[in-house]
């Protein structure tokens, strides 16, 4: 029996940089590019997020030879949202963004990539050590990586782990979904989302919408719903005078423009 060893993103990066082959992949990560837009980050299982506090994101990466999906998963995001809400007394994009950044920087992370390099060299070891965010791989990599000496993961995962700017896009998708559900699916918002954010029951009376009439307690996160949520939130805030809801970020390291820290406000409709 093996011991599950969950790692945060810095530990995954350190593991790769500590080996020759892993460090080569870390250096080559800059040859790939994250498709870093709000619309590209809307593949999130919202039911799992708001019921189990497991945030799983499929992040599209344009690699040197093909396009891939990096799957990042971490727990504890909603706990951090609750702390931010308790501190400020409200839930805005600012609170969601702070929680998303803090969770990504400090919480245990699970990883996966659709590329062949990850599949044949890393999938088994990350599964064996309880660090895989996708279906576990039980077939040992006896030929391609027999002793787990090639670092932690492929260059696409390392790109995502060393770049936190995409986390802001994820925060915007979640914030857009919260607003959309509050407006169009009040029952689901009141029964599932509101308690998950505010850590208390929804107490105000509300009127059921047509969609709420269905006997359904599952949060829908199909692509059409996610696209509608993002579009709704953009239109909702685009022309509001004096809109300061949100956060502004700046580079925390001049040598790495992909690392950001929270400073103050920025318009909620920025992509």
Image: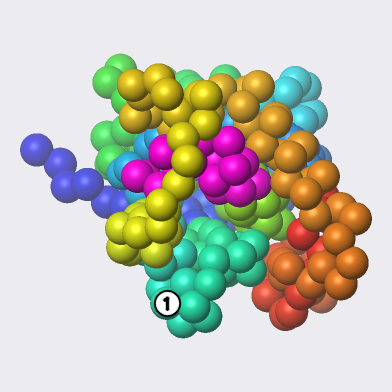
Image x and y of residue 210, in percent: 52, 24
Front residue of 195/139: it is 195
Image x and y of residue 89, in percent: 49, 78
| Picture layout, residue 40 above or below residue 254 | above
In terms of secondary structure, what is the magenta stretch mainly? helix
Front residue of 104/124: it is 104
* Residue at the image position 73 percent from the left and 23 percent from the top: 67
The number of callouts visible is 1
| Picture layout, residue 5 above or below residue 248 | above
Instruction: Confirm whether residue 158 shows in the render.
Output: no
How many residues crowd around disc 1 within 10 Å: few (fewer than 14), some, or many (20 or more)?
A: some
Q: What stretch is highlighted in magenta?
A: 176-193
Image x and y of residue 61, in percent: 71, 34
Asked if residue 67 lies left or right of residue 48, the reply is right
Image x and y of residue 223, in percent: 63, 23
Residue occupied by mark 1: 86
In magenta segment, residue 172: no
In magenta segment, residue 177: yes
Instruction: Confirm whether residue 259 shows in the render.
Output: yes
């Amino acid at each position: 029996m093996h011991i599950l060893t969950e790692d945060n993103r810095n530990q995954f990066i350190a593991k790769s940089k500590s080996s020759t082959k892993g460090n080569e992949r870390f250096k080559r990560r800059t040859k790939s590019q994250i498709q870093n837009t709000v619309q590209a980050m809307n593949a999130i299982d919202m039911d799992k997020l708001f019921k189990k506090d497991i945030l799983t994101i499929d992040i599209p990466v344009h690699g040197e030879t093909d396009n891939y999906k990096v799957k990042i998963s971490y727990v504890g995001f909603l706990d951090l949202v609750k702390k931010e809400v308790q501190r400020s007394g409200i839930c805005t994009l600012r609170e969601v963004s702070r929680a998303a950044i803090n969770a990504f920087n400090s919480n245990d992370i699970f990883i996966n990539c659709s590329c062949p390099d990850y599949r044949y060299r890393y999938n088994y070891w990350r599964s064996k050590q309880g660090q895989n965010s996708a279906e576990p791989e039980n077939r040992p990599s006896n030929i391609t990586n027999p002793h787990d000496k090639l670092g932690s993961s492929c260059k696409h995962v390392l790109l995502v782990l060393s770049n936190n700017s995409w986390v802001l896009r994820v925060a915007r998708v979640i914030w857009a979904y919260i607003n959309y559900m509050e407006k169009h699916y009040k029952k689901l918002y009141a029964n599932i989302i509101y308690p998950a954010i505010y850590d208390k029951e929804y107490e105000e009376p509300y009127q059921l919408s047509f969609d709420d009439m269905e006997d359904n307690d599952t949060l829908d996160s199909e692509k059409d719903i996610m696209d509608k949520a993002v579009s709704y939130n953009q239109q909702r805030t685009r022309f509001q005078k004096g809109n300061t809801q949100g956060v502004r970020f700046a580079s925390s390291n001049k040598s790495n423009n992909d690392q950001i820290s929270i400073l103050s406000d920025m318009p909620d409709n920025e992509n």
